[in-house]
C-alpha cells in the first residue's frame, strides 16, 4: 500500500517547481466580519457618479433644447420639462450620495491599518521580544 502513495518517475515530471522567496518583514492585520463585508461589497461610488453625470448631461441638453427649439405641442413641452427637472433633481441627489459614501472603503482600510502601533513603540517591542 505504501507504494501507491509514492510518486513514480512519470508523476514527478508533472509536479510544479515551487520556489519560495522570504519576506524581510510580514505584517498581518486582523479584520472583523463587518469590515470584511465592507471590503467585499466595495463601494457604490462609481455607479452613483456615473449615473449622476449621465442624468445631469441629459438634463443640460434638454434645457438647451427647451431654450432653443420651438415646441408646438403642450404635451411634448410638459414631457421635456418633467424629464429636465427629474434629471436635475435625481442627478444632484446621486451626486450627494456619491460624495457622502465615496470614502467607505478607504475609511475601513484606515481603521484596519490604524490598529497596528507604529514601529518602536513599547507594545511592538514587547511582541517582538516574545518571538
Image (cartoon, helix red, strand yellow):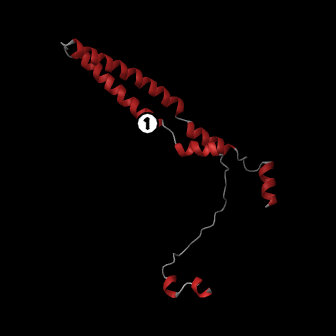
The residue indicated by pointer 1 is 47
- Residue 100: percent from left, percent from top: 53, 29
Residue 112 in view of the camera: yes
Q: Position of residue 13 (x, y in %)?
A: 49, 82
**Residue at figure coordinates x 28%, y 21% from the top left:** 62
Q: Residue at x 27, y 19 (%)?
A: 64
Q: Is residue 89 above or below residue 11?
A: above
Secondary-structure class at tag 1: helix
Check the image and report above or below for 79 versus 126. above
Q: How many marks?
A: 1
Looking at the image, residue 16 lies above or below residue 84: below
Q: In which image quadrant can residue 28 be found?
A: bottom right
* Front residue of this view, candidates 17 and 42: 42
| Viewport quadrant of the N terminus | bottom right
Q: Quadrant of residue 103?
A: top right
Task: Write the residue at 22% across / 11% down.
Answer: 74
Q: Is residue 17 above or below residue 60?
A: below
Q: Residue at x 77, y 51 (%)?
A: 124
Say left or right for 81 vs 7.
left
Q: Is residue 80 left or right of residue 89?
A: left
Who is closer to the viewer here, 91 or 6?
6
Q: Position of residue 6 (x, y in %)?
A: 58, 84
Q: Quadrant of the C terminus?
A: bottom right
Mark 1 is surrounded, within 10 Å at the Cα level, by few (under 14), some (14 to 19) or many (20 or more) other residues, namely: few
Residue 5: % across, % down: 59, 82
State whether residue 67 appears in this view: no
Amino acid at each position: 500500500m505504501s507504494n501507491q502513495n509514492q510518486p513514480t518517475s512519470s508523476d514527478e515530471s508533472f509536479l510544479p517547481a515551487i520556489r519560495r522567496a522570504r519576506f524581510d518583514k510580514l505584517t498581518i492585520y486582523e479584520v472583523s466580519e463587518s469590515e470584511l463585508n465592507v471590503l467585499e461589497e466595495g463601494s457604490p461610488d462609481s455607479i452613483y457618479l456615473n449615473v449622476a453625470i449621465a442624468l445631469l448631461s441629459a438634463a443640460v441638453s434638454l434645457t438647451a433644447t427647451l431654450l432653443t427649439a420651438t415646441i408646438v405641442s403642450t404635451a411634448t413641452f410638459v414631457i421635456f420639462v418633467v424629464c429636465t427637472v427629474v434629471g436635475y433633481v435625481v442627478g444632484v441627489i446621486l451626486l450627494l450620495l456619491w460624495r457622502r459614501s465615496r470614502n467607505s472603503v478607504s475609511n475601513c482600510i484606515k481603521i484596519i491599518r490604524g490598529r497596528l502601533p507604529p514601529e518602536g513603540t513599547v507594545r511592538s517591542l514587547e511582541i517582538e521580544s516574545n518571538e
